Amino acid sequence: MSYQPIENYGIIGDLNTVALVGLNGSIDFMCFPNFDSPSIFAALLDAEKGGSFQIEPLFKERKTKQLYLPDTNVLMTRFLSPEGVGEIIDFMPVEALYSGKELVRRVTSIRGEVTYQMKCRPRFNYGQSGHTVQRVSEKEVLFAGHDPDTTVLRLVSSVPLQVTGTDVGAEFTLGPTQSADFILEHVDREHAKGRDFEAFVTTSLFETVNYWQNWIAQSTYTGRWRDTVNRSALVLKLLASHNHGSIIAAPTFSLPENIGGGRNFDYRFTWIRDASFSVYALIRLGYTKEAGAFMHWVEKVCQEIKGQGRLGIMYSLDGHQELEEKELTHFEGYKKSSPVRIGNDAHAQLQLDIYGELMDSVYLSDKYGDPISYDFWESLGKHLDWLALNWDQPDEGIWEVRGGRKKFLYSRLLCWVAFDRAIRIGTRRSFPLKEAWRTERDKIYSSIFTEFWDEEKQSFMQYPGAQTVDAATLLMPLVRFISPKDPRWLSTLKRIEEELVSDSLVYRYRQDLAAPDGFVSHEGTFSMCSFWYVECLSRSGQVEKARFYFEKMLGYANHLGLYAEQLGFQGEHLGNFPQAFTHLGLISAAYNLDKQLDRNQK
């Protein structure tokens, strides 16, 4: 069994977790029942030991297409052959509609008489635990994981199932318009006895389609790239926890940033930074409910750490910070890129920028959504007091380098944002403000222009004395620290273009000249930075260039409009997938580019 490229996958989800469905009809990644649960399918990381759920027609030759039902997260995989045409509709009934956690697969023959093969090969506890199979009836089996993973799964089918060892399969033939259904569900309750299986699949399919179409209809975006922006919004929604309000960075773990390299991390957690950026994007599209849910989650986190020190950079879905990093040595990794990691030791890092991203999201949520409470304001104030005493120190920065702390420009910039947005909120809401916040804000402003400006290079540098720039600097005009047409900014943008831009693609930093990141491997271009670059171009007045590069970037999406974290030398997708960073960057770039183009047409 060979590895499918990362970009060959679509994603479905129920607002608790997601599944990755390949162009070949195989579900090769799924953590169940929650985003941060152990995997039950992880063939994407180890084709033999990871587990998968494969359905495919037994055609001698075939072509495959994959598409979403319009404005939904319901995925259709279609197989075309001279022998016939078959399709699979994959979806997960959303938590808002159904209390169970279910994966539904409906197989239909469209043309001809088609024979299909199904193989369900779950592997429990990241492939570390064995399991048993219990046949309940001809069309129902139970998979039960051994300790320590006691997950129980029920597979129900409309066709007879065969048990082979600890796997379950089926071979069946469908004539034109005939269908077969499969449901894999988490057994934490008894389903209704006598449930009309086929009717349930049909009803839940239509209700799930309606849910997603009704959700996307609430978007206020009416610009030039509506389908593309809608798809990115649907991705961000899939990464939001219905039960907790938290938003994860990506639903996968250890997909490599470089094939064969060591930069393989677990992104199934809520980074304050990534989630705050997601909130910006959702608010721009009018989704204030999701922003409010995240604000409630943040408020709970702030209350729980009261008096216990600084805000953490990342948390689990429910707000805990026990994210110990471990290596799964039995998994070979995607295309043998090891180690495969779960958990993330970066949770203990100092990243001062998170205060700025958080305060900006609070500012926008307070302005466009529900006003924040006094108690939340007081809680935030304690973190700002800590920041007032600690902003001028080295940290690991936005890129989470593991090679030592530096005084990064980006961290300094976002500390300025934290105080600036606090002052804006306090002024607007007449909340009590501390003079220290204004004082420190102005100190930071001055320090950026004195410590980080290199007169010889005519650029703001990654850190004082650095020999290179940092793509994170692209946020300077986007957070309204500096005018997008300020001469100092334009010369910095030119320096970034010379050092980090390859056509429309942007590298995060020069690893040979920047702060050591603790790894020897080289990575691809970082897609969020590419979209930041587009936005900087459009804001600086280079609108046609911005549009050209933006539409070139759209060409790097996969067949469904999805993006991983990075792009490799040949445009292949690298890193965890799909990545919130990339999709929120796309939304922001499209939104701003529309505004600039409209302005130019008047």
Image (cartoon, grey):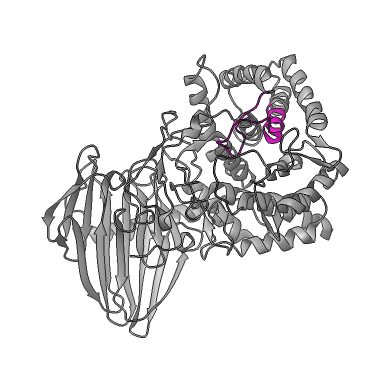
Front residue of 52/157: it is 52
Q: Residue at x 47, y 36 (%)?
A: 245
Residue occupying image coordinates x 80% and y 38%: 482
Residue 325 belongs to magenta span: no
Magenta range is 393-418
On-image quarter of the C terminus: bottom right
The quadrant in which the N terminus is found is: bottom left
Q: Is residue 374 above or below residue 538?
A: above
Q: Closer to the camera, 522 or 546?
A: 522
Residue 337 located left or right of residue 359: left
**Residue 255 visible in the current orientation:** yes
Q: Is residue 96 left or right of residue 427?
A: left
Query: In the figure, is residue 285 to the left or right of 140?
Result: right
- As drawn, 105 above or below 459: below
**Rendered view: 560 above or below 262:** below
- Percent across and percent down for residue 23 are 41, 67
